[in-house]
Structure formats: C-alpha cells, structure tokens
Amino acid sequence: MSSPNPKHQSPTPQTDPPLTIQEIVRRLDGLLTDLSGAKKDPEKASKLAPQPDAKDDDSKATADKPNPLDKACNELKYLKSAFEKLKKFETDLSKPLETLEENVRDILSDLDLKDYVKEMIERNLKVLRGNITKVKAQIPLQHQASSISEGRYLQTTNIGKDVRTLLDPYGADGIFESKTFLKEFEEHYSYLDVRHKLCLLCFAIFPENAVVKKRLLRFWWEGEKLLSETKKEKMEKEKQMSETKEERSVNKILEKFVEMGFVEPVTKRSRSQVTSYKMHPIVRCLIIRLAQKAKFFHFDPKGYPDENFFKSKKLCLVKSEGSSWWSKDVPPKAKEGEKQKQKQEKEEKEKKEKEIVKLEKDRVKYLENLQTLFNVSKQFPDLREELFSKMKNIGVLYLGRWEPTAQRHMEVEKTDFLEGLENMGRLLFFSLQGISGISKLPKSLGKLYNLRILDLRACHNLEELPKEVGSLNKLTHLDLSECYLLENIPKDLSNLSNLKVLKGFVISKNSKCTLKHLTKLSNLVKLSINVNKKDFSIAAPETADHFFKFKMLRKLKIAWGAVAQEEEERDDAKSKQGNEGKKAQANKTQESQTPKSTARKVIGKLKNIRAWGGVHGEGSSKSVLTAKSGEEMKLEKLDLQCFPERELPTWLVPENLKSLERLYITGGQLSNLGEIDKQWNVKILRLKYLFDIKINWKELQLQFPQLQYLEKVNCPQIAFCPCDASGVWVSKQPPTH
C-alpha cells in the first residue's frame, strides 16, 4: 500500500519554537539575497520598470524614477540592520541583569535579619528601582511595543501602580494633578521666562529617551530667534573669544535646564565636554502637555507629533501610512460598503473633488503663515513644489536627519521642489543633513538673503555648490562635512564676510575656491578642511602664510583623504601606458627599456614624497622658515587626521600656538610631536592610530606639562602611560591657571 502524499495529510497541531534574533537575521539576509538577485535579472526587473505618466512624455524623467525593487531592498537592509542591533542588545544586557540579581539578593538578605535597618532596606529598594529604570531605558522600541497588555502586567507586578500609569500619561490627568512632583515641576517651569519656556518645549517633538545634540538645539533656537540677548546680557563683557554669542547663550540655557532637573547631560568618557542632552520620560510627558496647551506643536492623543497642524504655526513631518497631508489626494476614509451604486459613486467623486479644492486652499493659507517645519521621522521628504513654495514666512526649515547617528536612511527622488526656496526670504536655518539623492542645489538657494545657517552635512551625493551661495551675505555657519563627492566649490564662497564656521571645505584640483580665497573671511572662528590634492602641503611657506591670516580662527581641523594617492596611481598608469607606446613606436627591446622606466618611477615617487614633506632634505618641512617674529595664531583646538608627513611643519610649534589647549592627532605618518625641549600648553591630548611615534610617559609630561587629559588608542610605541583599559588618563590634580 502506497504511502499517502504528504501534501494532502492534515497538519499535526504543534507549537513552533520561537525564532531567535540570529535566525531572524539569517532569514532576512536570505530574503535580501533573493530580492537582489531578482533585481539583477533584466527580464524580472523590466516587469517593474517605471512607466511614464500620461502627462509626462519625458523619457529621462521616467528613467530617473526608482524601481520598486530598489526600495524594497533598502527596506530589507534597514530591517536586517535593526535586528542585528537587537542581537547586540541581548549580549549587552547580561551584566545589568547580574547587577539586578545582586540588588535583589541584598534586599532579601536584609529582610531575613531580625535586627534589620528599615532605612537601609528602603535605600537598597531605591537603588534597585533606579537600576530597573536604567535597564528599561535600554530596551529598544520594538520590544516595548510588542504587547501593550503584557507590558502593563509586568509593570504592575514589579514596580507598582504609579509607574504603570505613565505608560498612558495622556489619559492620566487625575494622577498627575494629585502628585506633589507635578506642583514642583510647574513651579520650576513658572520661573522660566517666555524665551526659555519655548526653548524647553522644543524637546517635546523628540521620541522618548532621544539623545539630542547641543549643536542642533543651538541652530534651531537661533532660527527661532530665541537666543537674542537681553539688554542686561548685552551690557556684560564677554571674555571667551573662542565662543560665539549664540554658543555662550545656549550653554547658559542648557546649564539652567540641567540645574532645574528638566534635562540631563549625556556624557561620554572619551569626551571632556558635554555635547548631547536627553529628557527623562516623565518630564517629557509633562513637557508634551505644556506644548499642547501652548499650541507650540500639535500632538495626537498618544503624544506623538501628528498631521493635524492647523492649531499651530509649527509643523512636523512624520512617517505616515497611505496618503499624507502633503499629497494631492484627500486621506482615504473607511468604506461604507463593498458595493455602491453608480449614482453614489458619482456623488462621492464630486464630493471628493470639492474636498480636495477646499483642502488645497486650507493648505496654502496655513503654509503662508508657517514659522517652522521640522522633520521628525519622515524617511522620504519629497514635498510638492506648489506647496513647498508657499512657505514665505518660514524661519526654520529642517528637512534632514536630527539623530546623532545615521540610523534612519533618508532620500529624495527629485529635487525640483527645492526651486521653491526663492520665495523664502525670511529663512534663517536650513538643513538637509543626511539626505541622499541631492547631487546639486538649485540657483534659488541664492535668494535666501537672511539665511544664517546652512546645514548640508552628510549629503553623500552632493557634488557641487552653486555660485549663488556667494549671495548669502548673512550666512554665519556652513556645514559641508561628510559630503564625500563634493569637489567643486565656487570662488564666490569667499564673499561670505560674516561666515564664522566653515566645516568640510575641500581642497582639490577641481575646486575653484582655494585656501588663499578663504583668507578674505576675516570673521572665521572654526574651519575644517578635507585635502584631496596630492601637491598640497601645510609645510609650504605660502600655506603657512595663509593660515596666519586667519586672525579670529580658534578651531582648525585638517583631514587628508585617499584621493591624492589615487591621483598618483593614475599618473603612474598613464606614464606606463605612454612608455609602452613609445617602446612600440621605437621598436626597442624590453631589456633596454626596463632600467629607464624604473628610474622614472623612482624619481616620480621621490618628487611626490618631497612635495608632501615626507623625507628630510631640501623638499622636506625642515626647510620651511618659521613664522615672522611676533606673529602668533590664537588657535585653541587643532585636529589633524591622516597627517601625511613625518614631522610637524616648523610653524606648528608651541611658540606660535601659545593658546592651544586641545590637540588631536589621528592616523598618518607622524614620527614625533616636535622637539622634546619645547613645551606645549595643551591640556587635552588625543592620539590615535599613530604607529611611528616613539615616546614614553616621562617625555610626554616634559613636552606637555599642563596636561589634564590623555586619550591613547593604538599607539604601540607611546609607552608606560598610566591609562585605563580604554586608553584614558585624567589628572587628579586641580587645573592650574
């Protein structure tokens, strides 16, 4: 008797074992491989090729449309990355759980004692609850949102009713009003003036436990005109030359918020300064309620920024399912029935058309008075040009990524909507940070006559800046860092006489703007440079002369890229091809050509090394004259990355940099830190991936007698330093003045 076909057997009821994170990552990787294979198959990919619109006959426009397979692959990559982070989270949680177990054992031991001390047990319980809160803060949102009912049950049995109710703070009016901490919070909040209250309410739009960079807050508050000095502040004399007026103001505000318990600083052991802040979940709940009451932003009942924006002049872009507020269609409503008569369909169609017309008028009217547009969670901020151009009174336009790390991929398919910038004459702060798909910016950028801050950080596809950027006369901050394809910077950039901070300036053979042109920027306080040109050397006398012309410069960063090496390899390849051509034409033997070809290579490499100052001799940095007598740079921070020379140029010496307090050197060919008998005033020293510097702790102390903080990473020949396992040493002596 033949066995039955297994396909037709009734399934045996059984419970599948739960998937591990590792298994999920493996299966997602398989899905990604399969889908990527389909994308590479021309026959399969053609089935999903974008079709031209009925009103658009432009074949190029059709070709620019992305294939849906590409988007699906990107989403799978993101999903795989997210689960890989969850896998790491499972590993990192072992030590905190051990600590919680020790806490519970200590409490139970105390309870078993006859002569117990009540205060001691209460203190240990407080420590335990504090540790539980810290562990909760590490739980990813995917875990928190897995089961609301289960989460409430766990909170009820482990912590208690008061904390459980915080899971739904927006329906807990009676609980909040009955607590003394609410009265204390409102009392502290009432002490703030209107300007500081508005600064604090800005935290309401960020997700729970979000880490917010001080840099973002400063730019945002400046764009909102919340950092304007009072008459009393204007009368005070400012002593710190390295900080701008806005930096001093934002530092004072954040210090005040920390002191009053509204926010807490996020510290990193490798950083001596606080650059990020976060807000406790309970405080955030109260801030959201206050923001709603003040109509600062509009939120949905769960506390998230939503798209019912007409109650406020500040608008959030949020990730939405289906039609968004910006789309041409009215957001879909629930179906009343599966079958509808023809008459009803016609009536519905006419009604929908009227709704669209009304909604469009409401949108335009609202956008004309909009003051702030902030992207909270939208991944593809493609906005309709006809609506984008209506924001005539906007002051803050933040379309980019606010997160401190690149966790959220952002991209635009087309940049036509940016033409609407020409109508935004009141814009003060504009950010496209982290958005891919922008290869160039429109000429309309030059119409932003009042723009103070332009943030193009991590726009990885950006290749050039329009010359119209030179029309932004009021610009004080321009961030081009992490724009790795950017090589063409127009000379018009040197017209920005009010520029204080320039990050990501590129020195390359294709750039029309050089370091010499930048010397016209007399107000420059902070400058970072990416060197992609093989014949550029900071050891050259003319280069040193340029740097000494920056009288206000306090922070300087120079990073050398791999482009120069690639240029050298291409030149060698071209030279080799030329030699082979000549050899063929002259019909010479291979043996007679080899010595000459080798000689050319050796001479070429020696010339290249001398140009970079990499060997001692006439072409090295030792032949460069020191700075003119009495000339001194006021630099307070110097950061050198992948420094290509063996020795520091003679103008980078302690006598020329008496104000230097922070020195960072990462990677490169540097063999020493200058002459051992010359002392630096540096207080913070960071040395990373320096394999050729040979110095011991005693010699380091002689060179840096004021040293208070040392970070040493992968520097095998810097020996006997009393650093901890992380490579950090901190002085126990109080700082000398």
Image (cartoon, rainbow, N blue to C red):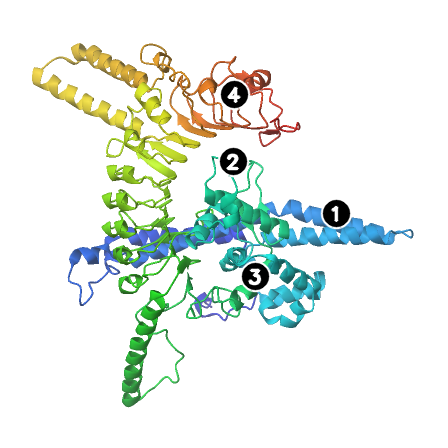
Report, in whole angstroms, how far the alpha carbon at label 4 lies from the one at label 1: 48 Å
Disc 2 target residue? 239
Residue type at mark 3: give it. Ile
Residue type at mark 4: give it. Trp
Q: Nearer the viewer, mark 2 or mark 4?
A: 2
Q: Nearer the viewer, mark 3 or mark 1?
A: 3
In the figure, is residue 319 to the left or right of 349? right
Residue 680: numbered disc:
4
Residues at circles 4 and 3 in contact by the CB criterion of under 8 Å: no
Q: Earlier in the sequence, mark 2 or mark 4?
A: 2
Q: Residues within 10 Å of mark 2 (few under 14, many from 20)?
A: few
Q: Position of residue 273 (x, y in %)?
A: 55, 38
Mark 2: secondary structure: loop
Q: Nearer the viewer, mark 2 or mark 3?
A: 2
Q: Residue at x 37, y 38 (%)?
A: 502
Q: Residue at x 74, y 53 (%)?
A: 126
In the figure, is residue 231 to the left or right of 137? left
Q: Earlier in the sequence, mark 4 or mark 3?
A: 3
Mark 4: secondary structure: loop
Disc 3 target residue? 287
Q: Earlier in the sequence, mark 2 or mark 3?
A: 2
Q: Earlier in the sequence, mark 4 or mark 1?
A: 1
Report, in whole angstroms, how far the alpha carbon at label 4 lies from the one at label 3: 47 Å
Q: Earlier in the sequence, mark 3 or mark 1?
A: 1
Q: Nearer the viewer, mark 1 or mark 2?
A: 2
